Amino acid sequence: MAPGSDVIDRPVVVAGTSSGAPARRWLVPLLLVVGWVLGVAWRMWLSRHIVLPIAHTDEDSYLNTARALAGGPGGFSSENELLRRVGYPMLISPAFLGDRDFGDSYRIVQLINAMVNSALLPLAYLLGRRLFTLRRSYALLGAVVAATLPATVFYAGVAMIDAVMAPLVVAWLLAVHRWITRPGALAAATVGLLVGGFHLLHSRGLVIVAVHAGLVLLLFVRRRINPPVVLAALLPVLAMALVNEAAIRYLGSRVYLLGNTPGGSTIEAVASVQGVVRAGAAVTTQLWYLVVITFGLAGVAWAAAVRELWRPRHGDPARWTLGVALVVTVGVAGGSSVILAGITGKPLDAIYGRYVQMLAPFWLLVGLGVLFTAGRRVVVRRAAVAVALLVVGGTVIAVRLAYVAAQGHSLRYGGFSAPELMVLTGGWRELRPVTGTLVGVAGCLLLVGAALLPRLRLPILGALVVVNLVTMQVIEQRIVRPFVASATPTPQVADVGVRPGERVWASTGVPYILRFNLSHQVTWTDVRWFGDGQPPAAAQVVFVRWAPGQADDWDGAAYGFVRLGGNQAQHWAAWRRI
């Protein structure tokens, strides 16, 4: 077999027939279906230990809203009026139909997440084939790399919107590519519907809506589309916005908001030279993070995308698609940095990669497309840009961390900030920009070597899949399981004798993670909160602090309650009114 030959692509001549085209036509779809099923199973296996939420308060907000949409009791949400979205709760709300305990509903939510998240595999394959016309084997294995990226997979096990964002990004950009190729009303409506989906799902969709509006305007001004197509592109976005508002009105007061609307604090955070520098450092960190976790491929892709804007090599549709993706990447990184800078009461993050993670699979695939289709000199130049981005970004981050430390402060780090970066750099307690840069550079050089030696391409892609699988396994053991252990109250609410139908309240004296997860197990009513003193007259059962010998230990006997049970080590107990 010649170097770089492709078993999947090679025709098979049989007994005078033209080729094995019918068999080959079904092979890739079959592999994609099998891969999707295996992806769902793998994601469910990774989440097997997560029986209650571990990402507070985002999960609590989505789950309470989903339960209310399904006709059950509501609860609180950490969202605010301006940025409130109900798309993800709508998606998972079927998990709360019928009479089942919370554990079963939560497992169904994980299954919904896994099914949508795994859809990235066929979408990534289509992207590789259409954007760069990659041969089937490269597109297929590249899609497996993208679909197993920890940035994609990590959130599938928890009730968070991020579980569905990466597939939606790839689907949307595929639709944009199709629209530019054939600028008809149906293609425009498809793009508009997906953009509306972003708006319905999360506030970062505002960036995508703005980019979409700019794209429509630019296409119209350049006479590439006519007024009916403009309407076809914009009306679905408006429709999704109306759906969001209708769902909010349906919920009424059953879901009450605890979040603060962005305002003066956000403006003040960036209204000075220091604020602009701080936001710029945060943007740099997020972009550097994308390059590291894609092993330099995002940097290769950005260099190629900028070049594509001026001298297209892959056609007009690819040029427009990559331009849109570039603007969205900078917009999401910048917008999230500004919003996070305006949140008061919390230390700033050393890194918060959650909002840009959805873009990692797309840029990884674009980077692979560049390496596998460009000439030797082009590959080397694009890789040099990626290495420069890694070095400059790592330097900026190192300087920022050193400056903050010199001022006697520390930046928040860990948990859900950038879990795969913790594994790749061994930075369990602190962000390690130098190590991250070295990891990114080493990965980039290996991929360039594979691109220049075609016989190494498939083995290197296979090695990346193994790295992703191992990284997720380490994340599951070192990050997820400790979160589960600290967030799971024992015994369960039903085991201490709390009965369905009882009116339940929770004291703010109970550690907040345990308070939330105790409340989730009460599926028949919204568990409201009270202070450390006398509970409301309507309360029949209360969850309170249990800390004998401490001043904040709650004595229910003084209020006419009897203790049902609880966990003294976790500092909670359930009491029932006599």
Image (spheres, grey):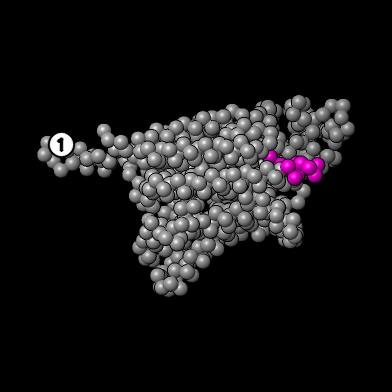
Q: In this view, does 6 lie to the left or right of 63?
A: left
Q: Residue at x 46, y 31 (%)?
A: 466
Q: In this view, does 290 lie to the left or right of 520?
A: left
Q: Give neighbour class at mark 1: few <14, some 14-19, many 20+ (Cα, 10 Å).
A: few
- Of 234 and 414, the residue lying toward us: 414
Q: Residue at x 67, y 50 (%)?
A: 281
Q: Is residue 531 above or below residue 79?
A: above
Measuring from the top left, give residue 386's x and y in whole percent: 52, 46
Tag 1, which secondary structure?
A: loop
Measuring from the top left, give residue 527's x and y in whole percent: 70, 42
Residue 408 is covered by the magenta coloring: yes
Q: Quadrant of the C terminus?
A: top right
- Of 186 and 524, the residue lying toward us: 186
**Can residue 99 be seen at all in this image of the molecule?**
no
Q: Quadrant of the N terminus?
A: top left
Q: Residue at x 58, y 59 (%)?
A: 206
Q: In this view, does 163 lie above or below 83?
A: above
Q: In which quarter of the image is residue 372?
A: top left
- Of 302 and 73, the residue lying toward us: 302
Q: In this view, does 520 lie to the left or right of 141?
A: right
**Residue range (magenta):** 402-414
Measuring from the top left, give residue 77's x and y in whole percent: 67, 49
**Can residue 301 be seen at all in this image of the molecule?**
yes
Measuring from the top left, give residue 507's x and y in whole percent: 78, 39
Q: What residue type is labelled 1?
A: Val
Q: In which quarter of the image is residue 456?
A: top left
Residue 553 is covered by the magenta coloring: no
Q: Which residue is drawn at 15% across and 36% down?
A: 14
Which residue was labeled with disc 1?
14
Dominant secondary structure (helix, strand or loop) of the stretch shown in magenta: loop
- The residue most toward the front is 377
Q: Is residue 74 left or right of residue 11?
A: right
